[in-house]
Amino acid sequence: MQKNNKIAFLGTGYVGLVAGTCFADKGNEVNCIDIDKDRIEILKSGKIPFHEPGLQEMMIRNMQKGRLTFSTLDEAKLEQYNVIFISVGTPNDSYGKTDLGKVYDAINYIKENVKTSKIIIIRSTVPTGTCSAIQSIVDEDNDINHIVCSNPEFTKEGDAVNDFLNPDRVVVGIPKGKEIKAFFYNLYMPFISKEKILFMSNESSELTKYSSNAFLATRISFINDIARIAEKLNANIEEVSNAVGMDPRIGPHFIRAGIGYGGSCFPKDALSLVNQANEVGESINVLEGAIKTNNYQILYFLDRVNKYFQKNNFKKKVTLFGLSFKPNTDDVRESRGVMLYNLLKKEDFSIRCYDPMNLKFISKPIPYYQNIEDSLEGSAALIISVEDEQYKNLNFKALKENGIKAIFDGRNLLKDMTEELEGIDYFSVG
Ligand SMILES: NC(=O)c1ccc[n+]([C@@H]2O[C@H](COP(=O)([O-])OP(=O)(O)OC[C@H]3O[C@@H](n4cnc5c(N)ncnc54)[C@H](O)[C@@H]3O)[C@@H](O)[C@H]2O)c1
């Protein structure tokens, strides 16, 4: 029978809140902690500080049952929990190397405030070797026996609750000689069968996370390279990727051509892995190429927009659909839409943006409309940066009547819709 745990999360962002809520839903007692007081206030009032389908209902249900609570770091009483997850952010520094400052802040806090032995689980994405380094730091206190384990996150924003409840596999890194498997079986068997809980060293677990993201990023860049060739050779990349993906050895996912990958994970994790390789005197040529392609792909697309406007001598007024990094999220971290906006600004375009979400800008907010009609006013072209299915249902006749001369489709979303697009210059990728 499942033994319920008392779990604390240090870091209540996309990862901490989803994981904490899902663990609570399976009967564990969970406290989600954050240094951001405003965030904790929002959560205590039963609201969530970002968009994630299905999360709020589950969160409220578990708050009402008394299994899910929220605390600021000052209020947190970590001593009463047997498990402490670390789920703080791990951004890159300006050289592409992972900045572990927030992880070590959390560890130092534990060192100062927790005097009984805990299972410390690193959920944040951290470079290979970090968990062992943390284990050495916490081992400096001779009379406390914390066990530091790696247990990376594989959920996708926009479908994170579903992913957490139905994982493909659970990856667990454990330090040598520690008997901790039974704890993880108990924690995860409400979500997944025993044989899909994969135990390995902390180093293998950390590297698994980076390899997974880097591999997916590489697939995207690979198909984007092919897409540009397809264009020159008169082939259709959608036909090519569809046929390639039907090979079961390859599979259909992450081989859709477009303006490249963005988001809170792929760009930073790919760069970090290149950095980790360099630090041990190796290089990952394939991944370096994938990053290069990703940087180039958006410029290639921008060039097409520029040339079109130059050739036709239109006023440089465009509408940009999609500022979040993908559909169904309000996260704009490293989003291609935001990048395009900034690039177009530099080229003196006047840009009206549309996004259906209440976006969470980290630094300077970009003005945008939540109404499609307002966003289209006065524009000569529409640019699509996110594969949101709703754009397939646009009234294309009205678009034409309102002066839209061209659509630049950065996700090949409308590529099949030749009939509807008649009378509009349509540009896809590949
Ligand atoms: N977002 C995703 O979908 C996703 C997926 C897989 C892995 N990851 C990884 O998970 C980690 C967290 O990502 P996220 O998107 O949830 O980040 P986030 O920025 O949304 O949330 C991190 C939270 O940690 C809080 N925090 C910072 N220092 C703290 C401290 N010392 N104590 C308590 N709280 C603290 C911040 O205030 C913030 O609310 C990162 O390493 C990321 O790479 C994220």
Image (cartoon, rainbow, N blue to C red):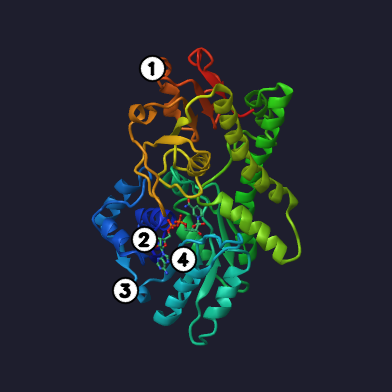
Residue 179 at x, y percent in the picture: 56, 71
Residue 108 at x, y percent in the picture: 46, 77
Residue 28, which numbered label?
A: 2
Q: Residue at x 76, y 65 (%)?
A: 281
| In this rendering, the label closer to the viewer, 1 or 2 | 1
**In 3D space, how far apart are the residues under numbered discs 1 and 2 (Cα atoms)?**
53 Å
Q: Residue at x 54, y 27 (%)?
A: 309
Other-residue count near label 3 (Cα within 10 Å), few / some / many at <14 / 14–19 / ≥20: few
Q: Earlier in the sequence, mark 4 or mark 3?
A: 3
Q: Earlier in the sequence, mark 3 or mark 1?
A: 3
Q: Which residue is mark 4?
A: 86
Q: Residue at x 65, y 57 (%)?
A: 273
**In 3D space, how far apart are the residues under numbered discs 4 and 3 (Cα atoms)?**
16 Å
Instruction: Inspect this view and state whether residue 68 appears.
Output: no
Q: Amino acid at mark 2?
A: Asn
Q: Earlier in the sequence, mark 2 or mark 4?
A: 2
**In 3D space, how far apart are the residues under numbered discs 2 and 4 (Cα atoms)?**
17 Å
| In this rendering, the label closer to the viewer, 4 or 3 | 3
Q: Earlier in the sequence, mark 1 or mark 2?
A: 2
Q: Which residue is mark 1?
A: 398
Residue 158 at x, y percent in the picture: 43, 43
Q: Amino acid at mark 1?
A: Ala
| 336 vs 270, nearest the viewer | 336
> Would you say the residues marked 1 and 4 are in contact, meaning their CB atoms lie under 8 Å apart?
no
> Would you say the residues marked 4 and 3 are in contact, meaning their CB atoms lie under 8 Å apart?
no
Other-residue count near label 4 (Cα within 10 Å), few / some / many at <14 / 14–19 / ≥20: many
- Which image quarter: residue 376? top left
Residue 74, which numbered label?
A: 3
Q: Quadrant of the C terminus?
A: top right
Q: Residue at x 29, y 72 (%)?
A: 75
> Would you say the residues marked 1 and 2 are in contact, meaning their CB atoms lie under 8 Å apart?
no
Name the side, left or right, on which 22 lies relative to 92.
Answer: left
